[in-house]
Image: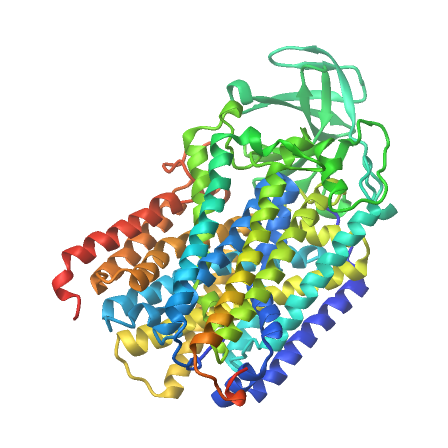
Amino acid sequence: MNYIVSPWAIVLFVAFIFSVLGISYHFARKTKSSKGYFAAGGNIHWSVNGIAFAGDYLSAASFLGICGMIAVSGYDGFLYSIGYLAGWIVALFLVAEPVKRLGKYTFTDALDAKFNSKGIQLTAAISTLVVSVFYLIPQMVGAGSLVTPLLGLPHEAGVLLVGIIVIIVVATAGMTSTTYVQFFKGGMLIIFSMTLVFMLFSRGISTKPDQGGDVKFHEYKKITVTTVSDTAVKIADKTYKFDKLMPAGTGNSQSIFVRLTKDGRDSIWKLNAKDKKLEETLWVTHNPDGTKLYNGGKKEEGLFYQVGHMTEIDGQSGEYHTGTLNIFSFIAKIKDGIVVRWSKNTLVDGQVRYDVYSQNPTPGKAVLKPGLKFKVDSEKGALPKDKLDFISLMIALFLGTAALPHILIRYYTVPDARSARKSTIVAIGAIGLFYCLTLYMGLGAMVSGVLDLTNDNMSAPLLAKSFGVTIFAIVSALAFATVLGTVSGLIVAASGAVAHDIMDRFMGMNMEDKHKVFAGKIAAVSVGCIAMVLGILYKGMNVSYLVGWAFAVAASANFPAIIMILFWKKTTSKGVVASIVVGLCSAMGLILLSQETYNNVYHLVNVKAPVPINNPAIISVPLSFITLYVVSLLTQKQRNK
Amino acid sequence: MHHGKSTEWKKDNAASLKELLGKWFFLLYSLVYAGFIFINVMSPKFMGIDVSNWNVAILYGIGLITLAMVLAAIYNHISTHAEELLNPKEKDDENK
């Protein structure tokens, strides 16, 4: 992909980030005293607090990840929008007010309110740490994704940039992410998303999208094939020389790729045996010395095109352009047409690995219902384990929100139940509206010729870029600021778990305030460094998918404990400890042994993973509940210890 | 984020009513959500049926998001009334 770095974009980006940091620092200095903090919290109108809630909650996962997944897999990405929002229902109706009535404010303290147990303090703190790290990884990956097209820097640079800024900020000023900054970010995110969707509708859809005239549509070549054998292919175009036949996969799902040579340059083509054609592909060459080539050339040569178009709209397959659309007709045009998606195959030739992307025309009807990523249709080959995976994901998303330690806590910074509730209603409204917009932004990216096949996280910002550098810079800066806010919040939560929950309470170190602060800062730096390393390792994975894992861990480790404490009198401290441990270990174990992790993190291609499903919730959540139930019943005599 | 110590909320006579309402609304939403999951795994073709310019999947999905917003608003409305009826009048400057 050739990213042309625009100086204006960089100026806007840097200016935006500095103003966000500046405003935040200004308010942080004013609210350094806890009294000042509460006064500010107490005087903020519930509508402002509500939008701030939304700004707090909507992270890289929502904006970059969901739009990215919808852009590649259609409706399956929207499942995350549905699930994330549904989780707020669990949080609002079941958990928020009862937990508040326990008289506590942090998750660990809420779990420990009735027991004062060392076991709970330790395991809940570890759980907070683990969930925070799992949540941090996608934010760092998202930051890396943003920086690349904007500043022309590699993924690693974006990760390091976020990590270093946040570590400096947390370690020096201990900056609070104030309500006003979150309100500003949340409001801007919604306004710019609405603007983007409006622009999308105005432009309409074309069979040959050219990003408003900026980027010429690339017509993918086809070469006629004269004969095919098991070892070679003869082609009509004599300027190309046949080099090698490279099959991928086995049985029914096998694809044949052909390497040709022209003017000393290799190219990879996909064999369409039915039509007797070789179709142009896009490929990334991974050389043994670590270098990468894009379509045979270096990245700067710009040979790797942006993709995403419809090959048929309204029954027309030539050059065709819809007029202005709306929320209904936009869906209809896609539904009744054919979208060109891209499938990835990995080929190995000696020491060289090729990631090959080939065209996969998909009926719009299939794009707009579940099934492209999460297989659910038995007639299309879905196995029971695939359906279990789908159910597991929906459970994790539903139960995860209420179990995220750093989310629920926002509920308690307002003075009364009524304001807290009203803020939550505003938040749910804002978040719900945003998630509806993600459907259109994702689909828009899918058909507007903007996608980077090597990184779907960039879909929404690249869609913005096709409408102009200004909106691109603002949208990227917003997303980056969101990442900064979320990352600093998570690092502070994690360092608090170490300093306050583990060192102070569990280990009984009873430190002086300034030592506690120092321990917190060391913890913050350590967690920050770990997050940076992991953010680099997990590069290229869809961020919403990664956050789905964080939700699964939270739903498994924390949710059973908090629900049973609230609603089952026979819960014992040992039961809680056992449930957190079992939930954590089973969720993490299943994730680390899943196929997605094998493929995308360990990079073990063509190795079957021991665990058949990718989301552990359907196993780890019930396991955790059962553990709590059984252990509590077995330890009833010690209930009042 | 330094969330620090939370504020103390006053005694709330409407608490048990809100808890009951919360549980029922949670149950209702869970059923609709479970229905979405069930239809997708048992009868995925149903999700592809056209509904004017949309299809069932889009309608159900956006419907779930909308239902969440509507239930939240109703919950708030009823809870606020319950608090007003069941809790003694508070001084203006303590109530925001």
Q: Is residue A304 visible?
A: no
Residue A436 locus on image (x, y percent) = 64, 51
User: Please, which colouring scheme is shown?
Assistant: rainbow
Q: Nearer the viewer, residue A260 or A406?
A: A406
Question: Where's residue A131, x and y in %?
Answer: 42, 60
The quadrant holding residue A345 is top right
Relative to A417, does residue A317 appear above or below in the rendering? above
Q: Nearer the viewer, residue A386 or A568?
A: A568
Q: Is residue A267 visible?
A: yes
Is residue A185 shown left or right of residue A411?
A: right
* Residue at the image position 67 percent from the left and 52 percent from the top: A437
**Residue A506 % position (x, y):** 27, 74
Going by the picture, which residue comes out furthest to the left?
Answer: A637
Residue at image coords 20%, 58%: A632
Q: Residue at x 59, y 66 (%)?
A: A426
| Residue found at x 69% / y 43% | A443
Say whether residue A397 is left or right of residue A323. Answer: left
- Disc tally is 0
Looking at the rendered image, the quarter that the C terminus of chain A falls into is bottom left
Front-lying residue, A253 or A64: A64
Percent position (x, y) of residue A315? 80, 27
**Which residue extends farthest front?**
B85
